[in-house]
Image: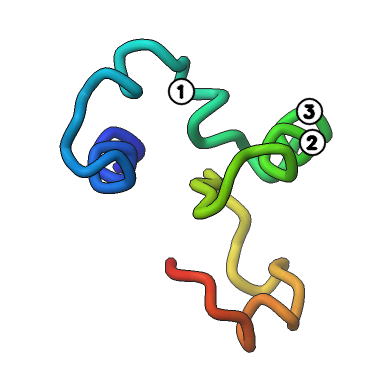
Amino acid sequence: MLEILSLIRQDGDPHWCRSVPNWDRGPWLETLLGYRRARGNARPRIISSHLPVHMFPKAFFTSKAKV
């Protein structure tokens, strides 16, 4: 899924996917390092997570984020 989203974000150009590691393109929200990387990434951000839905903040469900 990360590869597909990365290609969509770059209009199909695979250069970004090949040159930037997974953990920088779609950092894990559950880790402090991943959270910091995600905050520093340019928008639109790609964020990876395996958190159950009930653990997401309530503000997430009223945001414009795409899941």
Q: Secondary structure at mark 3?
A: helix
Q: Is residue 3 above or below residue 24?
A: below
- Pinpoint residue 9: horizontal percent, then vertical percent: 33, 46
For disc 3, the marked residue is: 33
Q: CA distance from mark 3 to mark 2?
A: 5 Å
Q: Is residue 64 above or below residue 67?
A: below
Q: Which mark is residue 22?
A: 1
Residue that extends furthest to the top in the rendered view of this protein: 19
- Pinpoint residue 51: horizontal percent, then vertical percent: 62, 55
Give the crowd class for mark 2: few <14, some 14-19, many >=20 residues within 10 Å. few
* 18 relative to 59 in the view: left or right: left
Q: CA distance from mark 1 to mark 2?
A: 15 Å
Of residues 7 and 4, which is closer to you in this image?
A: 7
| Marks 3 and 2 close (CB-CB < 8 Å) | yes
Residue at 74% of width from left, 81% of height from top? 59
- Pinpoint residue 42: horizontal percent, then vertical percent: 59, 43
For disc 2, the marked residue is: 36
